Image: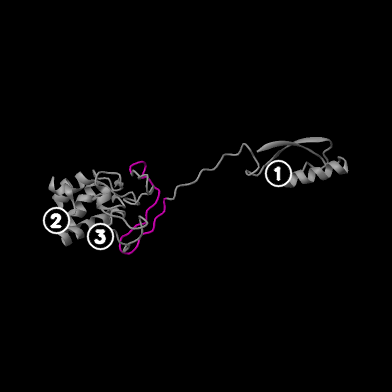
Amino acid sequence: MVLAVILTRNSSTILGRAQESLEKSINCPSPADGAVGLQMVPCSVPSAYDPYAPKSTPTPNTQSTTTSGGYTSPNEDTCGGKAKLNKTFKKNYGEPKCNFDKDKLFTLLKQKDPENAQMWFNKIVSCESGYNTNAYADINAPDQAKLDAGGAWGLFQMGSSKPPGSPPPAPGKNGALDRGDVNWEIQVANAIGTQKKAGNWKYWSCARK
C-alpha cells in the first residue's frame, strides 16, 4: 500500500486526464465527491511494479503419486531435514512420504523375509547405508564404477534406472530388481528378491565382512 497525491475532479482538464491514467495503473480510489484541491489517498500498486513488494521464492515440489504396486514418485520434501538428498539426483526417492523409521524397516523385513530379517537389519543395511533411505555412492567411490557406473542407491546400495527414480518396471543394471532409487518399501522388496535369485548374499560385500 502506498500514498499518492492525486488531483480532484475540479482540477484542470489535462491534469485530470493524467489523474485518470494514474488511477487505472495503480488502482487509486476516486476522491470524495465535492472535494477541491489536492487529496492524499491510499493506492494499491501491483506487486510486479512495486519495488518494496515481498519477493516470492520457489516452492519445493513435495507432491508424489503412488501406483497400485506401491511405487511412490520422488519429490523434493526433506521431511523436516531428516531426508538427506544426494547432490546428483537432488530428490527424495527413499522416503517421499516421510514415513520411514528403523522400527518400520525391521517390521517389514520380518514380514517379507523372517528367516533373514536380523541379517538384513543388523548387517546389510547397517553396513551399506547406515539406515539412510537416500544413501548414494557415486562412481568416484572405491570400486563403484566397476560395479555400476550409475552409482549405488538406497538402504541396500543397489542400482538405478535411467533416468534415476523412474517408475518400475524400468530396470537397473542387472534387471528390474536391481533398483535402489525407489521408495524404501520397494527397496526392501527388490533386495529380498535379488537375494532369493542370486543366493549366498553374493550381491552385498557387507555380508562377507
Which residue was labeled with disc 3?
174
Q: Earlier in the sequence, mark 3 or mark 1?
A: 1
| Residue 144, x across and y down, in percent | 26, 48
Farthest residue, direction right = 12
- The residue type indicated by label 1 comes to Ile
Instruction: Confirm or deny contact between disc 1 and disc 2 (CB under 8 A).
Output: no
Q: Quadrant of the C terminus?
A: top left
User: In what element is the residue under mark 1?
Assistant: helix
- The residue type indicated by label 3 comes to Asn
- Magenta residues: mostly which secondary structure? loop
- The residue type indicated by label 2 comes to Pro
Mark 3 and mark 1: Cα distance apart in space: 63 Å
Inspect the magenta stretch and tell me whether residue 154 lies in it: no
Read off the magenta span. 62-82
Q: Nearer the viewer, residue 9 or 86?
A: 86
Q: Is residue 75 placed above or below 51 in the rendered structure?
A: below
Of the residues tagged 3 and 1, which is closer to the observer?
Answer: 3
Q: Earlier in the sequence, mark 2 or mark 3?
A: 2
Q: Nearer the viewer, residue 40 or 48?
A: 48
Which residue was labeled with disc 2?
114
| Residue 149, x across and y down, in percent | 30, 52
Taking the image as shown, residue 195 lies to the left or right of residue 45, namely left
Which residue was labeled with disc 1?
26
Q: Quadrant of the N terminus?
A: top right
Inspect the magenta stretch and tell me whether residue 72 lies in it: yes
Of the residues tagged 1 and 2, which is closer to the observer?
Answer: 2
Does any portion of residue 9 appear in the rendered image? no
Q: Kindly identify the residue that appears in the image at 38 percent across and 58 percent down.
A: 65
User: In what element is the residue under mark 2?
Assistant: helix
